[in-house]
Image (tube, helix red, strand yellow):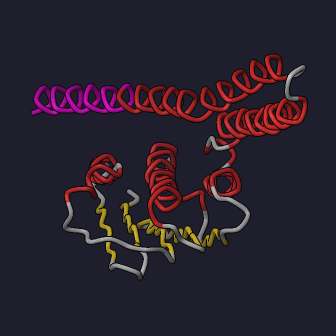
Amino acid sequence: MDRVARMVMASYVDYLLTKVKETQAEERRRFSRELHDRLAHQMTVVTQSLDLYKSLAERDPRRAEERLDLAQETAHTALELMRAFSHELRETETSNGLRIALENLMRISISSDVEAEVLFEGEEEHLPDYVRDQLYMILREGVRNAVAHSGADSVTVEVKISPKEVVALVWDRGLGFETSEAVTEGMGLKSMRERAELLDGSFEITSESDRGAVVRVRLPLV
């Protein structure tokens, strides 16, 4: 029985290591996509605007000045994007606590015209490191989905910790969607569900059109 137990444990550890590698690879792909889609686009606009400024400088000074203004404005936007990426890499780690990481995430991810709130109850000392990290990644994906898909004017993250379990929600006042649609699996929900189930927890999402969506995760604390 001891030998079987060791074999099962070794197999489980291998599975966890594989999941960690997959998570790291997905993070690298995500940053690569965002750098390409957002930052590269901004720098292309800057370059094209400066090229047009040079060609228009003598024959159409007014249009040339407009292009220069656009290049400057876009360059400032690109700089802000780089700062946001830098802050996300530096500040949203959970080593300083889940609550701080979530507050940093909300500040970085959600625009100023959207109401953002983190509600926290209980003591973080009950959370093992691996539970804290996986829970953060689930909630982070929920927040990103709310920002990208909901069109919400309010996003709230709520965490309740007890000695036996942690329950967390991400809910928004947005457009909502039909949860039966196949598109839901394209919103990172499969990964979120797998993370919860890996820790013997549960994951669900409920939504109705024009009434927002609620992501709910429950993880036992052993």
- In screen coordinates, is 182 left or right of 69? left
Query: Does 90 sit above or below residue 181?
Result: above
Give the residue at x 26% y 56%: 183
Dominant SS of magenta comes to helix
Query: Camera-side residue: 124 or 147?
Result: 147
How many numbered circles does the render carry?
Answer: 0
Give the residue at x 39% y 30%: 20
User: Residue 64 occupies which quadrant of the picture?
Assistant: top right
Q: Which image quarter is the N terminus in?
A: top left
Q: Position of residue 69 (x, y in %)?
A: 86, 37
- In screen coordinates, is 129 left or right of 103? left
Reply yes or no: does residue 17 show up in magenta: yes
Query: Does 113 sit above or below residue 29?
Result: below
Query: Camera-side residue: 150 or 15?
Result: 150
Reply yes or no: does residue 71 show up in magenta: no
Q: Which image quarter is the C terminus in?
A: bottom left
- Residues shaded magenta: 1-21
- In screen coordinates, is 86 left or right of 18? right
Q: Position of residue 71 (x, y in %)?
A: 79, 31
Give the residue at x 61% y 54%: 98
Q: Position of residue 21 (x, y in %)?
A: 38, 25
Query: Camera-side residue: 100 or 166?
Result: 100
Query: Camera-side residue: 7 or 196?
Result: 196
Query: Does 160 sit above or below residue 105?
Result: below
- In screen coordinates, is 182 left or right of 212? left
Query: Does 109 sit above or below residue 176?
Result: above
Please identify the residue farthest to the bottom as the structure is shown.
211
Q: Position of residue 190 (x, y in %)?
A: 27, 49
Give the residue at x 41% y 66%: 165
User: Residue 94 occupies which quadrant of the picture?
Assistant: top right
